[in-house]
Image (cartoon, helix red, strand yellow):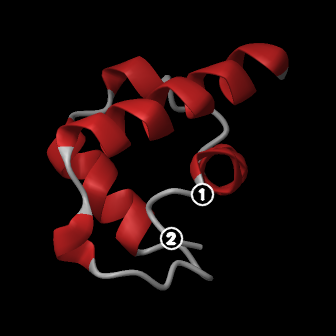
Amino acid sequence: MTWSDFEDIAIALYEAHPETDPLSVRFTDLHKMVTSLEGFDDNPAMSNESKLEAIQMAWLEEYKDNQ
């Protein structure tokens, strides 16, 4: 996975943290969560606020769909 794989990252985050409300996660923590996912293989320095926000929103959709 890379920073642009928002949907795949969102699914992996939901599977790893099903009880976590994505809106409660700060971007600094989200960055750490994404880079520690199994299968994530991109440069950690290539993230930015826009990418993290897109990941957070995709994760939120996944979270809502499964509640």
Residue 64 circle label: none
Q: Which residue is mark 2?
A: 2
Q: Is residue 1 left or right of residue 66?
A: left
- Location of residue 43 in the rendering, given as x and y in whole percent from the top left corner: 29, 81
Q: Is residue 53 left or right of residue 6?
A: left
| Residue 60 visible in the picture | yes
Q: Secondary structure at mark 2?
A: loop
| Residue 67 visible in the picture | no
Task: Residue type at mark 2: give it.
Answer: Thr
Asked whether disc 2 touches disc 1, contact meaning CB atoms under 8 Å apart, the reply is yes
Point 25% across, 59% down: residue: 47
Point 23% across, 68% down: residue: 46
Q: Is residue 1 above or below residue 22?
A: below
Classify 10 Å Cα crowding around label 2: few (below 14), some (14-19), many (20 and above): some
Task: Residue type at mark 1: give it.
Answer: Asp
**Quadrant placement of the N terminus:** bottom right
- Location of residue 31 in the rendering, given as x and y in whole percent from the top left corner: 28, 56
Point 35% across, 31% down: residue: 53
Classify 10 Å Cα crowding around label 1: few (below 14), some (14-19), many (20 and above): few
Q: Secondary structure at mark 1?
A: loop
Tell me the CA gap for discs 2 and 1.
5 Å
Q: Which residue is mark 1?
A: 5
- Location of residue 42 in the rendering, given as x and y in whole percent from the top left corner: 40, 81
